[in-house]
Structure formats: C-alpha cells, structure tokens
Image (cartoon, coloured by chain):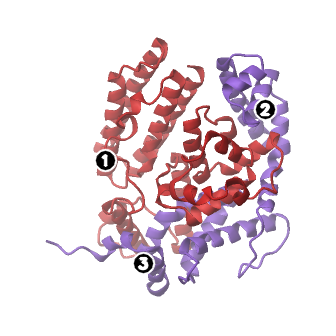
Chain colours: A purple, B red
Amino acid sequence: MLAKPPQLELAKLSDGELMEAVRSSRDQAAYAVLRARYHPETLAYCRARLPDKSDADDADQLTWVTVWEKPNYEPQPGKSFRNWLFTLAHNHCESVRRKKRGQSLDLVDPPIPAPNPWIELLCECLPLLKSGIASLPSQQRCVVEATLAGQKTGEAAAACNCTPAQASVAKHRAIATLRAWIAEKLT
Amino acid sequence: MNFPALEIPDEDRERALWLERQLVGLDLGDLIAQLLVVQQSSANVSLEEALGPRISEILRSGLSSLSPDEISGLLSCPEILLELQSRIFIEGGAYWQTVSRTPEHLAAVERVNQAVDQQLFGQTTANETAPLLAPASKTSSAKTWTWPLGIAAAVLIAAGWWTFRQAPPVGWGFDRPGLLAEADSGPAYLRILADAACEWSKKRPATVAELRTRLQQFDAGCETLIAAEHRQLAPKDRTWLVANCRRWQKEIRRLVDQLNSGAELSNIRNESDVLVEELRKAILDRAATA
C-alpha cells in the first residue's frame, strides 16, 4: 500500500497549525486549506459591512493577501485564528470605509469601532430605497411597507385590502420593479 | 441589489432557517438596510440585551431553538444582526459551517480567490483539478503554485471536504428522506422543495467524477419528484412541477453528456449552478402564486 502523501493530512490540522506552516514554511497548500475553510465567511463579513460590492470584494482580497504576506498570528489564550482573521477583515473594511470619507487609518493596530458606523454606511442607500418604494403603485407599496414592518403575507393582505395571493403577486412585482428602478438610478 | 427583506418566509419554521442563511450569506447588508426603511433604529439595543443567555446556544446550534417571537424580535432590531454575524463567524460552532451557501456566494468567492492568486503569484488559479492532471513538464515557478492548490483541493475532497463541514447525508435535495411529507399546504411544500434544491451548493464538486455523481444524484431527485403524488399541490401546480422536473432533468442529462464529452469542469459546474438557481427561483415564484 502506498504511503499517504503528507498533504492529505492537511485538512486535519488545526487553524493554528496551518498558520504556523504558512508562517514558517511558506506552505501554499496550508494557505489554500485555510482559504477553503474561511473564505466564504470573510467575503460575507465584508459584503455585510460595505454596501458597494466591489469595495467589499477588495477588502476581502486584501484580507487574504495579508494572511499570506504578514502571517503574524500566534496562538494565544482567548485569541483564536478566527478572531485574528476577522479582525484583519474588519480592519480592511474599516480602511475602505474611512478612505471613502477621506480619513486615514493606521492598519497596524486600529481600534475596532462600534457597529454604528457600519449601519450608518448601510443606511446611505435608504433615501434611494425609500424613493423607489414611493414610486411603486399603491397596492405594491402598501404590501412592501407592511412586509418590511414584519407582517406576514396574510397580515399584509388584510392591511392592503387584497387577498394573500394578490399580496404575493404584488410583492414579487414590486421586487422586479424596485430592482430595475434602482439599477437605472445607479447607472 | 437583492431584496431579502421582501422574501422572508411566512412559515415560522422556515424563518429560522432562512435567517441563518442570511447571516452567513452575501445579502445581510441589504437585509439590514431594507428593514431599516420602515423600522425605527434600535441602535441602543445590544445583542446581549436582545438575546441574553440564548447567544451561546445560537452559536452552538443555530436559530432553531428560538421561538417565532424571538425570530421576529431579531428582525425588528436589524442592527444587531451585524453583531450576531460577527459572533457566529468568530465563535460559532460546526453547525454554522453546514448552513448552505448560494451558488452566487461560491462564485463570488472563486472570483476573489482568483484575484488573490493574481496579486500574490501573478496568475489566476486554474480549475481545481487541473494541477493534479497537469504534465510534469511545467517549469514556470509561478505555475508550480497551482500544484499545492490542486493537492489542497484534492485533500479537501479526500477528507470529506472538511472535518467540520457536514456533507449532505445520503439522499439529499429532492431525495431527502421525509421531504415530501414535510408540508401541508401547496406554497409551503413548494418552498420546502426550493430549500431542498439549495442543498446542491452544500458540496462543491472539485473533480469531473464528483460533479458527474452530483448531477446524477440531482437527476435522481428530479425522478423522485416526477413520480411523486404531490398531494399538497393543486392539480395545475402538480402538472407544472412535473413538467418542469422533466425539463430540468433533460438539462441535467445534457450537462452530464457534455461532461462525458470532455467539457471543462468549471464551465459545466457554473452551468449547473445557474440551472439549480433558476429552478429554485422558479419553484419559489410558483409558491408565491400557488
């Protein structure tokens, strides 16, 4: 029987062991395994905080470039690899956010801000959304507002004087209309 | 822009699963912004205040333990979803690794991965299988980068993707045991089928053989739907579903044929992702009018 290649064991290694291989041996396979483990999460993290998708993807890209180029993570009690990784992702998002506002950021050890600035950023699209909703036909607008307020389809239908089936159709038409309306405004 | 806030399921049981997918997916920012259109800011409410001791349970095993009112409570404090996402990514248990990602999410990850490789190593990552099949005569130092990546991809497959990621059980998607008895109304039944289709993206086939098997399993799932009674559905919806299953099955078989004829893995995988997403959306749209 052939001996198992050492790479086949990589997937069994802990995050810390993989990072040690990246740091000390510049082990590209270990780096690839880390990316396979956490890349969907870091991208989701950046996309949730930066409304512009290309900004978010840039921050995510920089996060993984930093993991390879500056792999200075060292396991410590209370500080997991994931903690370190998402602090990196957070700081790259923060850097992008501040650049958009003409502020500079020292990436060496920046403070992690309260969540409010992110909400503030996400809310920048609110006027556009509100205008889009205001431009909808009245029944669609009513159903959309009721839905956003947390009402289920039946409740929204009752509030808008229509049947649940009509409310469902109105909602789907509203989505299509809003998508086209916002795309047009953004171009 | 997507409109997740307008696609919140009506069924309480589905809401928890849906919100889990939003928390680990790409549309959480859109969801928060859209919920804030009509809801007053709850910026002063912290995650701890909103969920208290339930947080550790959520981090360990997801949102299914929350009551419908607690799920609604989370949706009425959209700001804390951002903090919850952060906690899940940093402290969440293995359960959260099993929440399905959409094909769009995986495609976006792949695009960024290619950009990272381009920036670090001056070339895009080839398809995951290519390095394993590549001739040994490749001498470029940059090209050698694809070799460990390919091995790593193979490692992930060989090790069952990743120890903490649960592979779908035998009988996944439309073939999941008990699936067809899970709902008692037409719309709920169709939404469950749409959710089942999402299980396609739980596992990313990394070789031609794996993709072929995955497609054949999906084909078998369509066969199950074609043969099923669909008692929850009205006759016209039943006819619609069976007719479309035949159409999707035909498409899947075309993809398998192309794969067997030597078509590029990534092309067929992308086409498969698009097909599954289309059928998922079609079922959801039908659910809205059923």
Residue that carries the numbered disc 1 in the rendered image: B262
Gap between marks 1 and 3 measured at Cα:
28 Å
**Label 3, label 2: how many angstroms apart (C-alpha)?**
58 Å
Query: Are there few (<14), some (14-19), or many (20+) residues within 10 Å of tag 1?
Result: few
Above or below for B287 versus B175: above
Tags 2 and 1 both on a single chain:
no
Which labelled disc corresponds to residue B141? 3
Q: Are marks 1 and 3 in contact (CB under 8 Å)?
A: no
Number of labels in the image equals 3
Farthest residue to the bottom: give it.
Answer: A24
Tell whether B117 sits left or right of B253.
Answer: right
Horizontal side of A101 relative to B255 (left or right) equals right
Q: Quadrant of the C terminus of chain B?
A: top right
Q: Secondary structure at mark 2?
A: helix
Question: Quick check: marks 2 and 1 in contact, CB under 8 Å?
Answer: no
Q: Nearer the viewer, residue B188 or B59?
A: B59
Which quadrant of the structure image shows residue A47? Answer: bottom right
**Residue A34 percent across, percent down from the top left:** 48, 69
Name the kind of residue labelled 3 in the image.
Ser
Residue B46: x, y in percent?
A: 75, 59
The amino acid at mark 2 is Glu
Q: Residue A86 occupies which quadrant of the picture? A: bottom right
How crowded pointer 3 is (Cα within 10 Å; few <14, some 14-19, many 20+) is rated as few
Q: Which residue is mark 2?
A: A145
- Mark 1: which secondary structure? loop
State the residue in front, B62 or A139: B62
Q: Residue at x 41, y 68 (%)?
A: B149
